[in-house]
Image (cartoon, rainbow, N blue to C red):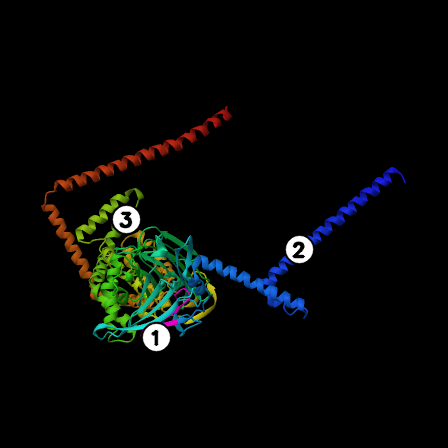
Amino acid sequence: MDKKTLIGLLIVGVILFGYSFYTSKQAAKYEAERFRADSIDRAEHPERYVETLPASADSEARRAEIEAQRQADEQAKQDALIATLGESLVAASQAEAQTYLLENEVMKIWISSRGGEVTNVELKDYTRGDLKHKGDPLMLFKEGSAKFDMELFIKRSFNTAQINTTDYVFTDARITEQPLADDGGVSRSLSLRLPVDPATGSAIEYVYTLYPDNYMVDFDVNFINMKEYTSNLTFFTFDWDVTSLQNEKGFKNENMYTTVAYRYPDTRKIHQLGASDGEKEEKITTQLNWVSFKQQFFSSIFIADNAFNEAEFGYKTANPNSGEIKEFSATFTVPYDPDQDNYAFRFYFGPNQYSILRSYDLKLEKVIPLGGSLISWINTGLTINVFNWLSKFISSYGIIILILTIMVKIIILPLTYKSYMSSAKMRVLQPEIAEINARYPNQEDALKKQQATMALYKRCGVNPMGGCLPMLIQLPVLIAMFRFFPSSIELRGQSFLWADDLSSYDSVLNLPFNIPFYGDHVSLFTLLMAVSLFVYSKMTYKQTQAAGPQMAGMKFMTLYLMPILMLCWFNSYASGLTYYYLLSQLFTILIMCIIRYSVNEEKLLAKLQDNAAKADRNAASKTKSKWQMRYEEALRQQQEMQRQRQQAYGGSQKAHTAKPQSTKSQPSKKRKK
């Protein structure tokens, strides 16, 4: 055996020995780790191993050892929690939760002892209107989605512990009744206590109070003998999360009105996060009076009798086919005063009905989108009062809308008449306007043509804006109705003719596909409204032609495009709104026909010509005023400047045209040479 072979065998031996040593050490480490894992698992789950051990004295001793170890670990954890929180809070974290019911004539409220939170609310007078759950009881929250957590820090010995009320079960629940004065019925209160230290009677108490026929719930937070534990506390917070259910037929329309609204103290207006798809959030670092999780017809509002220091809130839009609308979340910060034991709050769980919300004098009615200052005044001063008054005598809201339409048309009839007469005057003057257009056919004579037209109108006593101004005055009424009907809870669930719900779209045909910008159904009221708009536009087209050729050029838009746009836009809107617009359009057509047949256009033209003759005689007998002379001089100078510019432009054009001709002639001469 040579030297190289011996060295090779030695190296192989070292490698084998090293590999054996390494693998044996790894195996030992693996066994130790597995034994440790098994020991932990046996301590935490001894029931998994008891049956597998052989029945012997050693196995019994092993089981006893495992159980003792488990109990020791549990006791160590318990002792650590007790040292941090105290025995009462530890016991409250392990207690069994119960649910309590508060009820009056209009709603039911379920309150869980875990966290002392409102888990759901049922409104007795309403049912769900979505297609999948139509007729089911109306619940404000998705089951299991409600969370209301108060977070604060308490001082215990040398530790500061964070308390989240949702981790604990409130005990000592009591439901009490209190007769109200003047035979006002009975109020019911539920008090729940979270014990902090029974020895001193320290506890956090929630008290919910519900009054007869009322959607407002008083919510009081009482700190009982808590100064020892809250001496360092400067604020506490509430976290409120809920998921709102789809309660109306159309997801898109309901989602459009579902958002977060809030109000600053002592202000008339409210602010909204903005209703849209997707997610939105906002943080307010100033004081707030209340925050509302607002849906189309119902709201859940958290109100501070004093104010919240700041708040952060937002929402996430749910899938259209999920049966939900939005996931709401909000965090409120409340300043803490050690000398103050009671903090008063309120919850409003109820309909967005103007009269009810306004009765609380907190500007809660502002969550109803009735428009700006002028528009909302029309709704609150006229529309809502008429609806409330007529509903006392008439049960059909379709008839009420008909009466409301007639009342509005009577009120604006003078404006309609004035608008028609202005258009009629311009129409009978159309031959004179045609003569002026023929006299000034060129574009550079546009100013002269305009001056001649205005002079004709002035001589005849015609105001060219007389037809537009009355229509502009009527515009706020149309906008007010546009705001009122989709947000009017009075129309919710009210049927009329083929519409089963005037607050939602009326579908006479469900399509098996979705048409972009239109939808997957046919709304008959919307279709009839678009047809009536086309007829009205057809009737008034000749009058718009009389206003000038530029208006006549809008034929496609007025006759065809606008009805099509209205058809697509309003197909998913409230049928009460499209029904009102249909009635309004039909009455307008009827009034125009009556006025047209009652007005003698020959006599009207004779009157206008008489006005022109009088104006000519007055102009001849009067000396021109200084202002009129200055005005005519300014017009003359403007015309002269325009003429000079045209001459200069014409000369430059001739020079520019002549130059290339001369350059082309030179080469031709050279070629001849």
Q: CA distance from mark 2 to mark 1?
A: 82 Å
Residue 438: numbered disc: 3
In the rendering, at what x and y percent does residue 536 appear?
31, 63
Q: Amino acid at mark 1?
A: Leu
Residue 486: numbered disc: none
Looking at the rendering, the stretch of residues picked out in magenta corresponds to 100-117
Residue 32: numbered disc: 2
Front residue of this view, candidates 471 and 190: 190
Mark found first going from the N terminus, 3 or 1: 3
Front residue of this view, candidates 382 and 656: 382
Q: Amino acid at mark 2?
A: Ala
In the displayed structure, 509 sits above or below 516; it is below
Mark found first going from the N terminus, 2 or 1: 2
Question: What residue would you read off at disc 1?
Answer: 497
Task: Confirm whether residue 593 shows in the render.
Answer: no
In the displayed structure, 660 sits above or below 336; it is above
Q: Amino acid at mark 3?
A: Ala
User: Residue at the spot x=44%, y=71% of the render?
Assistant: 132
Name the dominant secondary structure of the magenta segment: strand
User: Residue at the spot x=18%, y=53% of the render?
Assistant: 460
